[in-house]
Image (cartoon, helix red, strand yellow):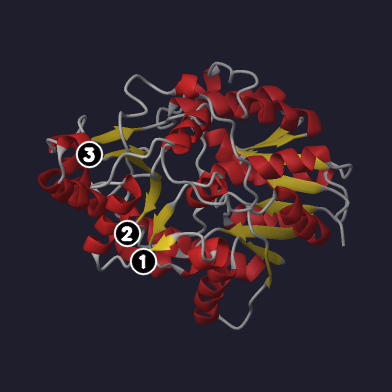
Amino acid sequence: MTANARLLDLSRIISRAGKTLTGVDRVELAYLKALIAQDTPCFGLVKTSVGFILLDREGMRGIARRAEEEEPWGKADRLSRVFRKLDDSARRGQSDARRLAMARTHRRGLGKMLARHLPEGSSYLNVGHSNLSDRVLHSVKHGAKARIAVMIHDAIPLDHPLYQTPVSVERFRDILGRVRAMADLVIYNSQATRRAVEGHMRHMGDKIPQGVVAHLGVDLPASTPGDLPKGLPPEGPYFVSVGTIEPRKNHALLIDIWERLVKQTPPQEMPHLVICGTRGWMNEEVFFRLDRSALMGEFVHEYADLSDGAVAALLEGASGALYPSFAEGYGLPMIEAAARGVPVVCAELPVFGELLKDYPIYASLKDSYLWQRRITSLAGIGRAKRADGPKRETPLTPPTWDDHFNVILKLT
């Protein structure tokens, strides 16, 4: 049954004001745009350093315009500058949220604020893996008497704890326990995610909340070659890998391959590797190799914070997109590449089979030489250079946000 009003948690987008949006950020933005376009009353909730902010529809529109870069984020206000641990993005985001607020409260007043402003029979949606505290969930459920719907994007911290810090593993375990105990609906981005998450929930107790799978929509950004920095795209065949440089993304395999290729390939046929992503955590060995490799700047290129349009322009000329991940929750960059007809080489993960089916070239992570053969084939090494550019596949038809929200909005 459709709710009388919907309350969307926007704490994640506010914390990343002015930064290039990641996959989860873009999901929260898609929900923001969808809710303000509906007739059902909608509100936004933001956790700040001093309490909570409630936004009405017009305030949510203001946040959407900023997140989509239609207008700039404002300057940090005096209150935000008191909190030295906040980075500049969080300061600016919280400051603008205060300027747009319809109501504000200290931490203990959240339940009363929500009860005062939200109609009875509302739904709270949290799709950003943030602000899922006991205080928030209890205030929503008992103060506002609202239903709770939470999206879980993956179970990677529990499935692959070696790729996470101990703190992040325990934090995720705590969040999953709260969601299991208090959520009325859990939204999953794939059947693979649902199986993994509900498996962990069963170890926590008998109660498993109602779940629904709704594949995330894919909005292909327009290509903007003018956003590309000098030196991009490289001359000759090149491959693109998009994603945060963190252990589970397995950039080490690609570096190994390029170090072998440069010894075996004539310089005029040597392909380039363009790594698009910011540096993450617990990946010092890969960072060291990127910083010290003689290939850097010649055949391997690292770029952080490229715009979506710049990445789209890179993909248009790429010989392939490479994703040797050990684990993924959804794989949005791969779907975007496939939707443009770019050949994709990826690991044999269940979520890729579910979403991409037989589109990619699958390769075992245990066989780096197989990966190398796939890459050299796509690059055309050892053959005459194609006059018509890199090979293209029939583009994959990606999931749409309309399909996603046709499922979700009927349940929330």
In depth, the one of 42 and 76 nearer the eye is 42
Residue type at tag 3:
Glu
In the picture provided, is 255 more to the left or to the right than 188? left
In the picture provided, is 143 more to the left or to the right than 18? right
Look at 25% across and 56% down and name the residue there.
Answer: 372
Regarding mark 1 in the picture, which secondary structure is present there?
loop
Pointer 3: what residue? Answer: 269
User: How many C-alpha atoms fall within 10 Å of the one at disc 3: few (<14), some, or many (≥20)?
Assistant: some
Pointer 2: what residue? Answer: 163
Residue type at tag 1:
His
**Quadrant occupied by the C terminus:** bottom right
Indicate the position of residue 111 as horizontal and vertical percent values.
73, 49
Pointer 1: what residue? Answer: 160
Q: CA distance from mark 1 to mark 3?
A: 38 Å
Look at 32% across and 23% down and name the residue there.
Answer: 231
In the picture provided, is 132 more to the left or to the right than 238? right
**Labels 2, 3: front one:** 3
Residue type at tag 2:
Tyr
In the picture provided, is 357 more to the left or to the right than 362? right
Indicate the position of residue 377 as horizontal and vertical percent values.
31, 53
Answer yes or no: do the residues labelled 2 and 1 have beta carbons within 8 Å? yes
In depth, the one of 118 and 225 nearer the eye is 225
Q: CA distance from mark 2 to mark 1?
A: 6 Å
Does residue 259 sit above or below 55 in this rendering? below
Indicate the position of residue 159 as horizontal and vertical percent values.
40, 69
Which circle's residue, 2 or 3, is located before the other in the chain? Answer: 2
In depth, the one of 381 and 41 nearer the eye is 381
Indicate the position of residue 225 as horizontal and vertical percent values.
48, 24
Does residue 296 sit above or below 149 in this rendering? above
